[in-house]
Amino acid sequence: MVVGVLELTLTFYAESLKDKRSVVKRVIHRAQEKFNVAAAEVDENDTLNTAVLGFVTVGNDARFIGSVLDKVVNFVERLEIAEIVDQSSRVDHW
């Protein structure tokens, strides 16, 4: 089994935590629909203009899993809802 983990730090304009929740939900929901990944906000929960999102996918081919994570990054960038200021990913065999 191969597990891929992606962490994205996003920045965006928000006037309230409600605005932030809206941005985070849109990014997560659209990525989950398109790539069948698990996703959640994993850090910076109370920071108004920053969010750290975690994405995870599982499969049996490390190259495929890495490709999915790369596509998620490109997809989030193309959404133009938020700017990616940091990213890290890891693909491990279990």
Image (spheres, grey):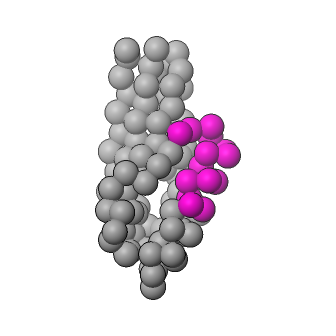
Q: Position of residue 37 (x, y in %)?
A: 56, 38
Pinpoint residue 4: horizontal percent, then vertical percent.
43, 31
Magenta span: predominant SS is: helix
Q: Is residue 54 left or right of residue 35?
A: left
Outermost residue, right side: 33
Q: State the residue at coordinates (40%, 42%).
A: 6
Instruction: Locate residue 33 relative to residue 56 in the image: left or right.
Output: right
The residue closer to the viewer here, 89 or 52, is 52
Please report the residue visible at 47 percent of the width from the left and 36 percent of the height from the top.
56
The quarter of the displayed image where residue 41 is located: bottom left
Q: Which residues are magenta?
A: 25-38
Residue 16 located within the stretch drawn in magenta:
no
Please determine whether, in this image, residue 62 is positioned above or below residue 7. Answer: above
- Residue 9 is at least partly visible in this image: no
Residue 34 covered by magenta stretch: yes
Would residue 24 appear left or right of 92 to someone viewing this image? right
Q: Residue furthest bottom?
A: 15
Q: Is residue 30 above or below residue 68?
A: below
Q: As rendered, which of 14 and 2 lies closer to the eye?
A: 14
The location of residue 48, given as percent across then percent down, is 37, 75
Instruction: Look at 62% across and 37% down and name the residue there.
Output: 36
91 relative to 32, above or below: above
Residue 19 appears in the figure? yes
Q: Is residue 30 above or below residue 62?
A: below
Is the C terminus in the top left, top right, bottom left or bottom right quadrant? Answer: top left
